[in-house]
Image: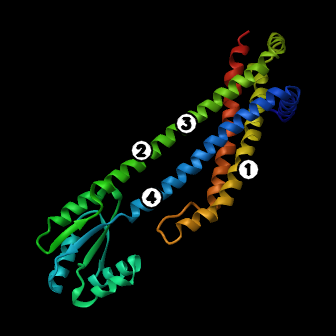
Amino acid sequence: MKIRTAGRHIKESFKSIIRNGWMTFAAVSAVAITLLLVGSLIALLMNVNKLASDVEEDVSVRVYVATGTEEEEREALRSDLEEIENIEEIEFSSREDELENVMGSYGEEFGLFEGDDNPLHDVFILNTAAPEFTAEVAEEAAAIGPVVDDVNYGGAEADRLFEIMETVRNIGAVIIIALIFTAVFLISNTIRITIFSRRTEIEIMKLVGATNWFIRWPFLIEGALIGFVGALIPVSIISYLYLSGFDTLMGYLSGTYFGLLPPNPFLIQIVALLLTIGVVIGSIGSSLSIRKFLKV
């Protein structure tokens, strides 16, 4: 496309946007509302995914060493555990460490169990290479022998948690795709009304020899501009709300292993994504709308 021709197409696009003010407003509103839903859902889904990852990473296999186990037997157990595949890290927590953790969580009154009265076990904590290996690693650890008193990783509850997180991710992705298609449909129908009002002009241009792309370009640019402007509104709203609520929500999560995605670079990614989606679906909507009017 020549620069002179490109300038003409851009000029025609702005003229059309101004001339069809109400139609433009309707199209921009359709984009803004739809992308606000899309952007909000993406932000929610990405943070749910972050929390899910935090939960999954926090799930570990706890191998309780039988009471009275000698140090040599305990080290032999460690060696056996190291032979199990898909274990990323093995940590040891003595019964004294376990009691300190209990006291830190539930109060100093549990201090009366210090010394020989400590009923807790030494524990090997196994961090797996991926959450899906947790159950398999737990089974292999439990089968080692009598030196293992018990193995715990949450069992069916942990498996159920992984399934729920995966379901949430899949459902969220389907809804986002559905909303994007809805946005394309709304823009397509809104711009089709604009194009219908100019069908005589398009027919005359075709009759005097204008190519399809010469006619199509102003409408594609118009759709892209509508999508871009429509995306600016949800981008502003989502950025403001996320920045406003981030510190408050992180305050509730303080002291836990969980957290939200930091505004930088998360918001930059959301802004770039929504602006790109706005421009793309605006162009696609225009392209779909004008196709039938080029068949003269």
In front of the other: label 3 or label 2?
2
Residue 169 location in percent, x, y?
Answer: 46, 46
Q: Earlier in the sequence, mark 4 or mark 1?
A: 4
Say which residue label 1 marks.
Answer: 236
Q: Is residue 50 visible?
A: yes
Q: CA distance from mark 3 to mark 4?
A: 23 Å
Residue 11: image quadrant is top right
Q: Which mark is residue 53?
A: 4
Q: CA distance from mark 4 to mark 1?
A: 28 Å
Which amino acid is tagged 2? Answer: Thr
Name which residue type carries label 4: Ser
Mark number for residue 167? 2
Amino acid carrying mark 1 in the image = Ser
Question: Which structural element holds mark 4?
Answer: helix
The crowd level at tag 3 (other Cα within 10 Å; few <14, some 14-19, many 20+) is few
Q: Quadrant location of the C terminus?
A: top right
| Residue visible at 19% across and 69% down in the picture | 150
**Pointer 1: residues within 10 angstroms few (<14), some, or many (20+)?**
few
User: Which residue is the site of mark 3?
Assistant: 177
Instruction: Give how far apart the Cα atoms at labels 3 and 2 are.
Output: 16 Å
Would you call the spot at circle 4 few (<14 residues within 10 Å), some (14-19), or many (20 or more)? Answer: some
Left of 177 or right of it: where is 295?
A: right
Dot 3 amino acid type: Ile
Element assignment for label 2: helix
The answer to whether mark 3 and mark 2 are in CB contact below 8 A is no
Q: Along the horizontal axis of the image, is 44 left or right of 208?
A: left
Quarter occupied by the N terminus: top right
